[in-house]
């Protein structure tokens, strides 16, 4: 690996200043190919003592990488820091999580309810959720159906997460949410064989007992 990198050369990028201007300093090993590329690169402001300087205002890492990576290994760790995506914090109403645990809901259901009710609260951010009416909740569910294109199962699970708060935690009366009847999975009817198709099947059976059994099953529907 070290031999390959040596053949390709190497570039290390640094944050620096040149003539009072913020720049990206390009440090490179003795490589004629890189020297030639830097000399031809219109973004490079200067090449001094084995380093090229590119103004930070025009430097674009993806474009630089595409241009120079065929000729050198590029270490850009000093100019680019990958920030981890912050973990989402669920701030649930008092009693919501506790009641889920008391009722011994499964860990996966608890996780789903937390996420879905958190989404519900985020959608109504700035409003007191205890003062929301059925039309407000219906509007939210229909927004998820029409805009977010959620599945039937997810729609029902989100409604359950909302109902759990208003009916279980708050002790409210049972309501129907979603603006429409609770969605049901569509189940198509099985295809029915025609008499000719059944005859062809029976003709392929040599065993009389098997033909009798198939005929009986077909006649019984």
Image (cartoon, helix red, strand yellow):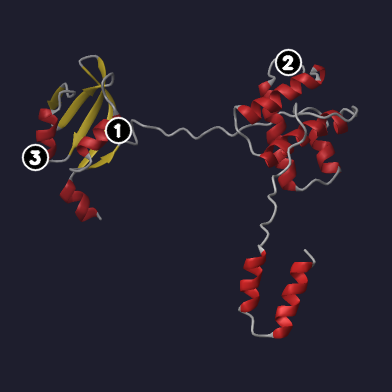
Labels 2 and 3 touching (C-beta < 8 A): no
Does residue 7 sit above or below 59 in this rendering?
A: below
Label 1 crowd (10 A; few <14 / some 14-19 / many >=20)? few
Is 62 positioned to the left or the right of 165 in the image?
A: left
Label 3 crowd (10 A; few <14 / some 14-19 / many >=20)? few
Q: Nearer the viewer, residue 181 or 66?
A: 181
Q: Where on the picture, by quarter, is residue 15? A: top left
Comparing marks 2 and 1, which lies closer to the viewer?
2
Q: Where on the picture, by quarter, is residue 121? A: top right
SS label for mark 3:
helix
Mark 2 or mark 1, which has the lower sequence index?
1
Q: Nearer the viewer, residue 189 or 184?
A: 189
Mark 3 or mark 1, which has the lower sequence index?
3
Q: Residue at x 89, y 27 (%)?
A: 172
SS label for mark 1:
helix
Instruction: Determine the CA span between mark 2 and mark 3.
Output: 65 Å
Is 67 positioned to the left or the right of 132 in the image?
A: left
SS label for mark 2:
loop
Q: x and y percent of residue 144 in the render?
A: 65, 29
Instruction: Determine the CA span between mark 2 and mark 1.
Output: 43 Å
Comparing marks 2 and 3, which lies closer to the viewer?
2
Label 2 crowd (10 A; few <14 / some 14-19 / many >=20)? few
Q: Residue at x 77, y 68 (%)?
A: 219
Give the residue number, with chain letter if any, for mark 2.
127
Give the residue number, with chain letter if any, for mark 3.
32
Total label count?
3
Give the residue number, with chain letter if any, for mark 1.
62
Checking the image for residue 31, the label placed there is: none
Q: x and y percent of residue 167 in the render?
A: 87, 31
């Amino acid at each position: 690996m070290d031999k390959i990198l040596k053949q390709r050369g190497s570039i290390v990028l640094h944050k620096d200043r040149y003539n009072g201007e913020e720049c990206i300093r390009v440090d490179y090993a003795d490589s004629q190919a890189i020297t030639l590329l830097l000399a031809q690169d219109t973004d490079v402001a200067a090449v001094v003592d084995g380093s090229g300087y590119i103004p930070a205002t025009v430097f674009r890492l993806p474009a630089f990488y595409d241009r120079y990576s065929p000729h050198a290994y590029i270490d850009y760790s000093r100019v680019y820091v990958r920030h981890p995506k912050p973990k989402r914090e669920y701030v649930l109403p008092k009693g919501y999580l506790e009641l889920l645990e008391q009722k011994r809901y499964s860990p996966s259901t608890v996780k789903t309810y937390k996420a879905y009710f958190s989404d519900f609260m985020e959608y109504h951010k700035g409003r007191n959720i205890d003062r929301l009416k059925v039309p407000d909740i219906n509007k939210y569910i229909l927004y998820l159906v029409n805009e977010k294109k959620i599945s039937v199962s997810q729609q029902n699970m989100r409604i359950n997460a909302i109902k759990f708060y208003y009916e279980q935690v708050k002790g409210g009366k049972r309501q129907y949410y979603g603006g429409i009847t609770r969605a049901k999975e569509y189940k198509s009817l099985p295809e029915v064989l025609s008499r000719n198709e059944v005859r062809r099947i029976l003709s392929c059976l040599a065993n009389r007992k098997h033909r009798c059994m198939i005929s009986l099953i077909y006649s019984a529907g």
